[in-house]
Structures are given as C-alpha cells and as structure tokens.
Amino acid sequence: MKKAPKTIDDILASYPPHPQNLISLLQDVQTKFNYISTEHLALICDYVGIPVTRAWSVATFYKSFSLEPRGEHEIKVCLGTTCHLKGANRLLEACERALGVAPGGTTPDLYLTLDTVKCVGACAEAPVVMVDQDYLGRASISSLKKQLKRR
Amino acid sequence: MKKIKNAAELQVLRQRLLAAQDPEQPVVRVCLGPGCLALGAEKVGQAFKSAIRSKKIKAKVQPLIKETGCHGFCSQGTLVSLSPANLFYVRVRPDDVAEIVETSLAQGKTVERLLYQDNGTSYRSAEEIPFYRAQQKIILKKVGVIDPRDINDALLAGAYQSLSKTLTELSPDEVLRTVEVSGLRGRGGGGFPTGYKWRRAVDNARKNPGPVYVIANGEEGDPGAFMDRAIMEGDPHAVLEGMIIGGYALGANQGFLYVRHEYPIAIHHLSIALQQARALGLLGKNILGSGFNFDLQINRGAGAYVCGEETAIIASLEGRVGEPRTRPPFPAQEGLWGRPTIINNVETWANIAHIIERGAEWYTQLGVPQSTGTKIFSLVGKVKNSGLVEVPMGISLTRLVEEIGGGVPGQPRFKAVQTGGPSGGIIPYESKEPFTDYHYHPSDSIPGRKEISVDFDSMAQTGSIMGGGGMIVMDDHDCVVDVARYFLNFLQEESCGKCLPCRLGLKGMLEFLDCFTRGQGAPEDIDALESLGRALVDGSLCGLGRAAPNPVLTSIRYFRDEYLAHIVEHKCPAGVCRDLITYSIDPEICNGCGLCAEDCPGACISGKKKKAYAINAAACIRCGTCQAVCPVDAVRVA
C-alpha cells in the first residue's frame, strides 16, 4: 500500500500534473487537512495548470469538498428516502438544537460538524446517522447522545 | 503471491485451495453488510475472534471466523451463520457471542433463542425461511459467504473461472454475441440492452481506431438503494472479472471503477481486490498468458447525485464539474477523452461472468422475455422484512412485498411502493384506473385482481421505472404529497444547473409542493404543476431533469384525493405535514411522568406529576420529541 502523504507536496507529487487529476488532488487534500484552503487550492491549480476559477467551480460543485475548516468529529444525519420516512428530519432538528449549529455548520471550538448526507446505503436500518466513520442504525436522540458522549 | 501464468496454473491453484479445505472445520460467517454494520456487527465479529482465541475449544480444527458481506435479511441483523452445522442466528449482539461459542461451537448444540422465529415457527437454517425461499441468488450467491478481502476465498467459490474460459475458448466477438443473446439490460435504472451498447462501441472503435474504455458506475445515488454497495463490498471480484471480460470483448485495455464518495468501505474492498488480482496476474499485462493487457483504477466520486449519469461520470473523470452533455454523441461513440466508452452499472458488470459461465441460453430462461435474468432489490421502508433480495424478473410486486417482505407491520396492505429513486414513481397497491396493458399475473389470493409484474416494461407502464432496485414501501402513515416534495427538494439540490427547464423548473415545482404541504394553493394548481412537470420531461438536457417529474406525476395520477385533502380541506390524512397536524396528549393513557415536558424544546407542555399532561397547541412546533420520549405512547397526532 502507498504510504499516507505527509505534506501538500507529497500529495501533488503522487499524481501526474494534468487537469484530469484535479478532483483526485482535491479529495486527497480534503482527507488530509479536513478542508481545502485557498493556499492549497492555488498550489493545486499551479500544479495541474488550470485557472483558479475552474478549480473553485469544481470545489463548490461537489458536496464532499469543504472550503471551511471542519470539526474534529462529524455527525452526518442521513436524509435518504427511507430515513426521511422514519423521521430523519426530526432527528436532524434535535441535533441542531442540541449542538446549536445549522446543518453544514461547525461548533465554535471546531469540535463537531453537523452535516447531512443523502443516503449512505444502510437503508434497512433507517434512520441512520454517521458519527465519523461509524454507522448508527435505527438512530434516536438518546442513542445519538450516547455516541456523542464517547467522543 | 505468485503470478498465475496461464489457465492451467489457475486450475492448479484452485485445486490446491480446495484440497486444503477441511469440510469438518466449523466456519462462523458474521455479516458485516451495510445493515448489520449499522447495528454493531463489527463488535460481534471482534467478540467471536477474541472468544475463539481465549476459549481454546477442544477440537482438532479450530473454528474459522469470516467477516463477510451482506447476508440480506437486514431487519434481523446482526446475522451469523454457522457451517457445517447449517445454523442461522439472528439479532446477535456482542453479549450473545460467548453463548454461541460455548453451545454451538464447543458442544455442537443450538442456541434456540437466537433462531429466526415467525408465527410460532423456529427456523434452523436460512434456506427454510420464507424471506429466502422465494429468492434466487445468483449475483449475490458469494456475498455473505466469502471473505471479500481474500482473493483465495473468491477463487475457491469460482471467481475468475469465466475469465479463464473467455481467454482460452472465446473470441471477443463470441463474448459480445453471448451478451447480446442473453438479453441483459442495464441494471442501474436505464435498462438499456447491454449487448447493443457494446456492439456500438466495437463498431465505432473499428471506424476510429484507438483506445476504448470501460467504466463501472458505482455512483449509487438513489436513496433507499444499496445493491451495488453490497456487491462492491461483499464480492468485489465479481465486478473486476466482469470488467476484464468486457474489456476483452470491447478491445479496451483500461477501465475505471467510479465509486461514490459515501461508500468508503466499498472503495477499500475494491482497492484490496485490485491489488490481489494484480499480484496474481489476473490484472495487468498478458493476463493468463493470453496476450491481453487490462488494468483498472478506482476513481472516487465527490458527492454529486448527477454523477450517476453517464456523461457526468465522464466529466468527473476528466477533472471537470459533473455536468451532463447532450447525446448524441453517446459515450459508445465519443466518451472519455472523445473515445468509445462503455459505462455499465456495477450490478450489470457482476452479471457478465455468470452469463459467460452458463451461457446466454441459460440466462434467457430466467426472468421474462424482455427482462431476462435476476434483479437485486433493496426492500426497505414500512415492511416487516427489510433487506437485500434477489429474484428473477417478472415476480409480482405484491408477492415481493408480502411474501418476501412479510407485509406492512400493523396494516393489512401497503399504501404504495416507491421505486426507481428520484427518477421513479409511487405505485399504489391498487388504483381506480385498472392496471392494464402490463404484463400481469392473476393474483394468487384475490380473485380478479391483476398484479404488476416487476420487470422493466411493466414498471414503466405505471409511470414509474424499475430503476436501480430501490423498493421503498409506504404505509398509511406516509404522506404522498410530502414524499413528492421530498424528491423535488432532493433533485433541486442535486441539479447541476446547466439547463433551464431543470434548474428553474424544479424550483418552480418545489414551490407548488411547499404550498401544498402547508395546506395552501388551489385545485387548479395541481394541473399547473402537471403541466410544468411535462415541460421538464420535454426540455431537460439529461435523465435527471427528464425523470424528475416522475414522483410528482405518479403521485398526482394515483393519489389526487390526497392532494385535494391538503389543498381544499387543509388536512394531511397521513398525519405528516407539520402545518396541518396537531399534537395532543391522550389523558386516558398519560401516566403523568413528565418526561415530555422535560424534553420539550418549546417548553409548551405543562402538567403535574402523576396527572395527565397537556400540550399548548399554539406554541407547539411539532418537533415530535414528546412522542419519541413518551414511555406509554400517549401522544396523538391528528
């Protein structure tokens, strides 16, 4: 397996400098640094040879990219159809009230980001909430509170 | 791992693996599929591993613990199967593991309480259970059986036998012919004849020599669908093998697995599969000594439903925003970097090896004439048995929901089934206009009733589509107007924005639905909404916009009365639309515990301990918290 990249230079060097690699580069930066800073965006553009506007367009088009720093932990409430039928909206509202942030927002101490996702593919256990990489099926406010206490 | 140099060496390896198997060795298969994983299956797997380590069972051969893909019966998770005892345990929690190890593995006895029970009957093994009996697992056969992270396990189960047959016995044209004759149609929702598409690409490549590409569409964006996720996670080699065979038939040497960002485990398992296949020489140069070179790479999606569309995937692979483009030219003519490209859904690719193994004739015997083969469905929502099922096409919708799904808990029948995701529609249990002109089954149980056949064309006749396989069952507590609004909201957010009918049209349609769910609007607005919907069908650039009106149009077609109840009577019969419902506490049932008042975010519940509490309807924001926390189910919604 390739070693995990350490710096932005490592990330850039792992792809040929070609515009078709823009998305992969943005993905690796997002994974490594938790968001895409304007500096890193500029470095990527210089590397693959495209204008910043084009990279900006791509970075704002796809939902997995964040141009703002994200929290250390992420809660993603699934809003897929099945989860919607099983009360995901109410679960999301309860999370908003408990954390004091709107979906997409991060707590001021950068500890938690609350977000939504449209289907994680665990539909038989709706409503589903993801806490970092863990799936919480048949989620309720109480089971979510238990999960949050552990982080 | 040593590279396999030819077909004979592959057989030798397989024979060696088979010979090393001990049929008496107990194998515990813990389901780590999407459903069970969300119920804590990882901890069950870990508990088994540490229990085996510490218990030191007195047996010649120690039990083997395999973490597998989806066993399918998600609502009964976590699922654990034991062989050779052929025991099937359900609802297994980490605390149950010690007992299973002691009772079943050490003593060879059954833990009765962990068997699946229904209607007074206990089922020892999976194949006896009604949920499984009506299914026919071909594509899912290895899922739940093999360890997806070990290519040897896949080889043992027969992986790459079809590739070997292809490279030693068949010409590219013979493979192409086989796929054409099989009648295989795209499993991602389009239902386009696969062989026909492949033939176009081959013809175009002949006119325009140069690279040809194959792509697996793993951007399974339909909410409610996880068929492809289960295949990619549970039997990744099925996809690889299909693509290598496809590459051979099409003259492609490079393929791409486009996997959605929201499926990290699928990406992980496919990565391992690629590495292991390369190490064995099943990918790369001179595969099995045939002279055929082919390799694959994984490209992650970045969070865009529209990238489930063929030309949007191509745009994404080229590093651009996922905006579809007009067709023609179709990808088979001009696709990735302008070259002939074949994009097929993951499940479609997973069908290829089976068709090669057993032949096109065999495949045409499955399903119905215009929809051959089996289809995997995710049967979810308000249904007793939810999970992943594989059935031959042509089964009746009612049989799928009632016999396999076990029906709707607490209600005699389903209200509707939502199929095909946001591009699909809402099919009612019965409609005032009879279902005619469809392939139909005479009902087994209701004289004179015609059942809808689940196949591409019959489903299309209802106004919905079969789609990728998501089947979301709705009951009387689900509001059709709310669901129509939900899909419009979804699609409006996911629209790429390139073409006006979709970009503005969806916004306009959503405004109508926002009004309706608030009890506003007039009956004429329903007609205006239908008209606007038809404009999107006619004018949109791609399938997202063209199919976007389907949920709305089918909901109006079959449930106009429910729309009128919202608009004219300002009522939501299902008790869902927030502006039209009131929460109250039934004083006969309330035990005065006060939990609702404690948790009420609006502080609008009052009462005294041990006496019935009451909600101030004027201040109530209808958040539902009181109903969720009430221990005696005293909260009413009307």
Image (tube, rainbow, N blue to C red):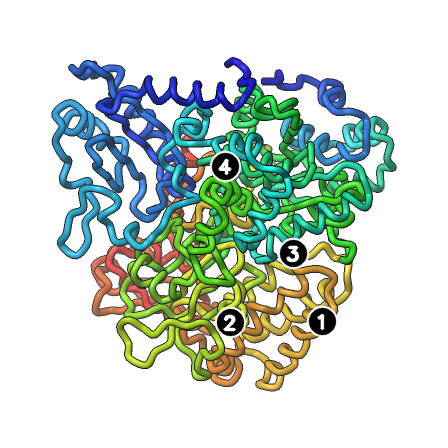
What separation in Å lies between label 4 and label 3 (alpha carbons)?
Answer: 34 Å
Q: Alpha-carbon neighbours of circle 2 within 10 Å: few (<14), some, or many (≥20)?
A: many
- The residue indicated by pointer 3 is B493
- Residue B462: % across, % down: 51, 72
| Residue A107 can be seen in this image | no
Q: Nearer the viewer, mark 4 or mark 3?
A: 4
Q: Which amino acid is tagged 1?
A: Asp
Q: For the residues carrying marks 2 and 1, which lies nearer the camera in this image?
A: 1
- Between disc 1 and disc 4, the foreground one is 4
Question: Which residue lies at the image location 67% right of the left edge and 41% below the top edge?
Answer: B250
Same chain for mark 2 and mark 1? The answer is: yes
Badge 2 is on which residue? B481
Image side of residue B453 versus residue B4, left or right: left
* Residue type pointed to by label 3: Glu
Measuring from the top left, give residue A143's x and y in whole percent: 37, 42
**Mark seen at residue B538:** 1
Classify 10 Å Cα crowding around label 1: few (below 14), some (14-19), many (20 and above): few
Label 2: element kind: helix
Task: Give the spatial CA distance, label 1 vs label 4.
Answer: 38 Å
Residue at 25%, 65% (x, y): give it: B612
Q: CA distance from mark 1 to mark 3?
A: 21 Å
Q: CA distance from mark 3 to mark 2?
A: 19 Å
A59 versus B22 height, above or below: below
Q: Are marks 1 and 4 on the same chain?
A: yes
